[in-house]
Image (cartoon, helix red, strand yellow):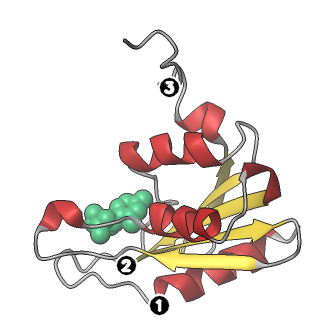
Amino acid sequence: MNVLELIEHAIKGREKSYSPYSRFKVGASILLKNGTYVSGCNIENISYGLSNCAERTTLFKVISDGYTKDDIVAMAVVADTKDPVSPCGACRQVMAEFLNPDTPIFLANLAKKYKQTNVKELLPYGFEEIENAN
Ligand code: THU
């Protein structure tokens, strides 16, 4: 897989960002095993708490198209930051649901400076047990 191409797709996804409140545009892209790129952006709302991050938009697109975590090769996230953008806690929990623990995640900025990570690193000791719920 080509990391720079994946980041390019995330940058393209970012161009669609709907972020009139924060004015902070974020893009993400996921490469599927069938070679398809699925990209997304953050989508804000006037009721700020309803805003959706680029990571979740993109993962939800992939899942709603019928793919599973085993169809995903890698994910990239990009924003106009000095250092590679870091996903929020909510997105880390969603990534833990829909990415395998070792699936490469590339955090990047517009200069394509990137840092490779994965769910194991982003969400150590994450919530994953409801079997004893009553
Ligand atoms: N945001 C993302 O889309 N992804 C991140 O990793 C960080 C934050 C969005 C949420 C909101 O629309 C804007 O960036 C400012 O927080």
Q: Position of residue 79 (x, y in %)?
A: 46, 72
Residue at 38% over, 42% down: 89
Disc 2 + disc 1, Cβ < 8 Å: yes
Q: Is residue 104 above or below residue 101?
A: below
Q: Position of residue 95 (x, y in %)?
A: 56, 47
Three-letter code, disc 2: Lys
Within-10-Å neighbours for mark 1: few <14, some 14–19, many 20+: few
Q: Is residue 106 left or right of 2 when viewed as pictured?
A: left
Mark toward the viewer: 1 or 3: 3
Q: Position of residue 125 (x, y in %)?
A: 52, 20
Report the quarter where the N terminus lies.
bottom right
Q: Which one is in front, 28 or 113?
A: 28
Residue occupied by mark 1: 15
Q: Is residue 49 visible?
A: yes
Task: Report how far apart the C-alphas of labels 2 and 3 lie in the structure.
Answer: 27 Å
Residue occupied by mark 3: 126
